[in-house]
Image (cartoon, grey):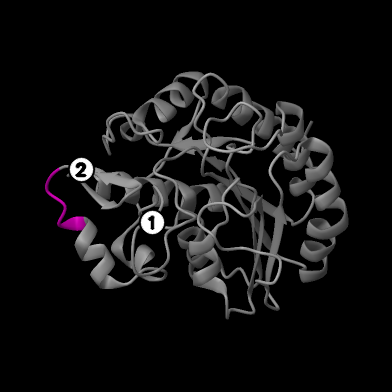
Amino acid sequence: MKATSHPELARLHDTGGHPESQARLALLLERFETETAKPATPADVLRVHTLPHLERLAAIDGRTYLDPDTPVDATSFEAALLAAGAAIAAVEHEAFALVRPPGHHAPPERAMGFCLLNTAAIAARWAQAELGVARIAILDWDVHHGNGTQDVFWDDPTVLFVSVHQWPFYPGTGGPDEQSETTLNVPLEAGCGDEQYVLAFEEIVEPAVRSFEPDLLIVSAGFDAHADDPLAWMLVTDDGFRELSRRASGLAPRVAAVLEGGYNLATLGDLVEAALDGFDRTS
């Protein structure tokens, strides 16, 4: 699988000493060859987010916090548009969007939990509007529940949202009773590793996605369930993420991925490489 991004994502959205920093993209852009994406347009974003939310992001003129976890500066809206544009390019070309800020916590009306715009949701709506894709599955294996993506698609029969995450944990949603006809939450307790994740895929995730028969699968690929990530307590290894990616690659005729979490700078590059290997259907 190829990768798409934008070099400015290693400079824009200066978060200081926050775990979600420019350094995440700087190391990935140095390591991987990427196609340069264009920013998403306001029309692309407004398929998911409200106009007041976009106006608030566009009006940011200095360093501040949008919630206790989400720092921004005057360049953050530009970065969020580039991230969403790369997610769209990933869907168009079946690639992995190496982007920041992440997106899966952002509901339509606000920013939340490091996330400004919901990149995976924007890409899904673009695919429906511009490619005519009828049925989409979004598979989120970030260690945190993708509450924003769930909110966007909760009542939409054309989009299946599946989230495998540590629970109970931030943001407090995604428990075992939080389900709908096209929302499948798979909460796992802290300390789970490759064996438990693969079992969840075999017994729950893969049958559900196959039954839905999506034309496109978008993976919200967070790597903060890794054993060495500083923000969570899961034990997935490089080989575990390679296997999850391999399994995901067979669940739809078109597959794309968007980077979400993953905050250990010493391991992030290897984890992305493992996922790219797994997603590569030619190998």
Place residue 13 in its image quadrant: top left
Residue at (51% x, 41% y) in the render: 261
Residue at (71% x, 48% y) in the render: 189
Q: Position of residue 53 (x, y in %)?
A: 27, 66
Image vertical order of residue 28 relative to residue 196, above or below:
above
Q: Which mark is residue 112?
A: 1
* Other-residue count near label 1 (Cα within 10 Å), few / some / many at <14 / 14–19 / ≥20: many
Image vertical order of residue 9 relative to residue 53, above or below:
above
Name the chief secondary structure element in magenta: loop
View extreme (left): residue: 61
Label 2 to label 1: alpha-carbon separation: 15 Å
Give yes or no for residue 61 being in the magenta stretch. yes
Instruction: Give the quarter of the figure containing the C terminus.
Output: top right
| Region of the chain picked out in magenta, as a range | 58-62
Q: Which mark is residue 73?
A: 2
Place residue 192 in its image quadrant: top right
Residue at (45% x, 61% y) in the render: 122
Q: Position of residue 262 (x, y in %)?
A: 53, 35
Amino acid type at image mark 1: Met
Which secondary structure, mark 2? loop
Give yes or no for residue 164 being in the magenta stretch. no
